[in-house]
Amino acid sequence: MQSVLIVEDSPMVLKILKHLAQKTLNYNLVFAESRHEAVKHLVKSSDWLAAIVDLNLPDAANGELVDDCLSQGIPTIVLTGSVDKEKRDHLTKKGIVDYVLKEGPFSYLYAVNLVNRLAQNRFVKVLVAEDSKVTRRYMIELLRRHLFQVVEAEDGEQALQTILSDKEIKLLITDNNMPKLDGFDLVHQLRHKHGKEDLAVIGLSSAEDKYLSAKFIKNGANDFLYKPFSHEEFFCRVMQSVESMERLDAMKKLAYSDVLTGIGNRRYFVEHARASLEECQNQATPISLALFNIDHFRHVNEDYGDDVGDEVLIHLAKAMQETFDRFIVGRLGGEEFCVVFPGLTDDKTSQLVDFFRTKIEEGYAETTVGSVSYTVSAGIAQSATLGLEGLMKSAGQALFRAKEAGRNIVMIASEN
């Protein structure tokens, strides 16, 4: 587990920081009240996520501990009682993550939350599109202070191809005046493929057109910055855009997730299944669909209660995710689940589904009342011409036949 160093000589402030950090941070927390004590900790470990350091300590009145941390490559957040332009510029040039004025609990909470933000940033990839090498390098250095993954492009066309080929890019920072493809056209083209929950965009320009920011945002950008910009304004815009994208993404996942089991819900399944079906039809590749139903699920609820019934549903959903992780899985409602198998014929799907049926039959769900055994039946359909609704109807008819035949059976639709 990585460690976070927190250094503050005021007992009261340190007490507040301890309380907030222990409540908020899931890391090994190391506290110190002086440079001497902190350096001992720094020597013992090299796996530091970040440090929150008081700028003026009794044995380091001129920020020497800040330099100690930065020299070891530790992202450092500075606590200070006051700041002016000279001090701000001095700290920024050192390469700190940010400075926080010691103005009360909210300020200390901001510092602690910033550590969690740094941890999250390690999984956020940012593309900097800027034809000026000097400006591009400056922004890359600032982003890396905050632990972002960074890639770069020197023109709009290169930026477009990079994003289209790399789905991990979550933030684009783009200049407007670039060769081959300007920022406006770049954003316009990207928004046809990426919504704001998938890709955040910050536009840049040194032009003094007062309508430029509105034009950029109307073209699909999340935010805009005029150059030159300050270190603080840059990060405020970046954080605001990233966190806004993450909130939208979380809302989308919530809208597409089954509340009980956590797998895709009906809406998720239908949208992804339709897209997969269309792709397979265009490429003339097979696609099949399996509809699952828990046998005698009403008896499970009656014998053990609805809460245990929910636990069985959760068990089945988890088993389906593990077995069919390469395919599209969704809960349609109640005890009914569905899986789409792109590239598989109904015969191959039947083998895989029957393996799963046997796995469920031979196992059991661990519940609050003990082990509960259950079985599933499934109907399978394949078609090169039917739409999703027709495919689901055909699989449903096969499932009905499986139920009538005695349950715990996999049936393939007779008409495809």
Image: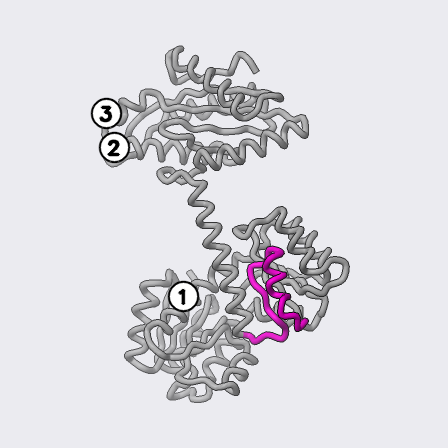
Q: Is residue 38 left or right of residue 382?
A: left
Sequence-first tag of 3 and 2:
3
Where is residue 166 shown, x and y percent of the image? 63, 50
Q: Residue at x 32, y 31 (%)?
A: 312
The stretch of residues the image draws in magenta is: 207-231
Residue placed at 33% from the left, 29% from the top? Answer: 364
Answer few, some or many: residues within 10 Å of disc 2's Cα (few below 14, many 20 plus, some between 14 and 19): few
Residue 305 in the image: x percent, y percent? Answer: 23, 30
Q: Is residue 373 above or below residue 203?
A: above
Instruction: Find the distance from the CA under tag 3 to the CA under tag 2.
Output: 16 Å
**Residue wearing tag 2:** 370
Residue to which mark 1 is pinned? 113
Question: Dot 3: within a 10 Å radius of its alpha carbon, few (fewer than 14), some, or many (20 or more) residues?
Answer: few
Q: Which mark is residue 84?
A: none
On the image, the x and y values in percent for residue 190 come to: 64, 51
- Amino acid at the residue labelled 2: Gly
Q: How is the image coloured?
A: one colour
Q: Which-is-in-front pick, marks 3 and 2? A: 3
Contact flag, marks 3 and 1 (Cβ < 8 Å): no
- The residue tagged 3 is 302
Q: Residue 361: in sight, yes or no?
A: no
Q: Is residue 148 above or below residue 264?
A: below
Using the image as rendered, state which of residue 41 and residue 282 is in the foreground: 282
